[in-house]
Image (spheres, rainbow, N blue to C red):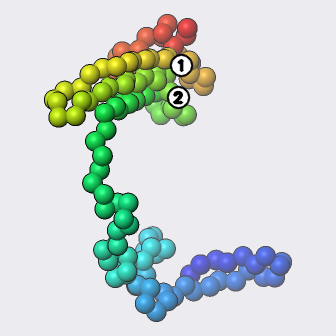
Amino acid sequence: RVHAPSMDGAPDVDVKKKPKKGKGKMMKGAWSFLKHPSKKDVAPRKRRKALDLPPREFTHMVVVDLEWTCDNRRRLDPLEIIEFSGILVRQRPRQPGLEVISEFTRYLRPVVNQALTNFCIELTGIRQDQVDK
């Protein structure tokens, strides 16, 4: 049963949900709002012409790394990003390996949990003075 409050001030109504014909059976229990997939849900999809083209080779890629506040004894809320770093690499077609073009790293001072925990310092290698700058 689903509780459906009325919008016009009339008394609230309980509505029993039934699966519509052809829409699949409803699941039981806590996941009752889900339904089993229908044949249409699992049928192969038609491809669009743009997706039929072979993928083009790419030459550059950006790899991003984020580190955030952490602790192994208590839950920190919110988790705050303390390091944002990235690297730009180039791959030459038909040659093995990647060439590093550029790198950057920025440290960010956390606002809520300003002091880094010993666990966080040990895990990330980021020191308190680096985020305080």
Q: Which numbered marker is on residue 108?
A: 1
Label 2 crowd bin: few (<14), some (14–19), many (20+), radius 10 Å: some
Q: Is residue 69 above or below residue 20?
A: above
Q: In which quarter of the image is residue 22?
A: bottom left
Residue 53 position in % (x across, y down): 30, 57
Q: Mark 2 points at which residue?
A: 80
Q: Position of residue 63 (x, y in %)?
A: 36, 30
Task: Kindly state the secondary structure of the residue where label 1 is placed.
Answer: loop
Residue at 49% in and 17% down: 106
Q: For the residue labelled by badge 2, is the local secondary structure a helix, a strand or a loop?
A: loop
Query: Do tag 2 and tag 1 residues touch (Cβ < 8 Å)?
Result: yes
Q: Report x, y in % for residue 67.
A: 42, 26
Q: For the residues carrying marks 2 and 1, which lies nearer the camera in this image?
A: 1
Q: Is residue 23 visible?
A: yes
Residue type of the residue flagged with mark 2: Glu
Residue at x 38% of width, y 18% of height? 102
In depth, the one of 88 and 76 nearer the eye is: 88
Viewer-nearest residue: 122 or 91: 91
Q: Which residue is drawn at 44% across and 85% down?
A: 23
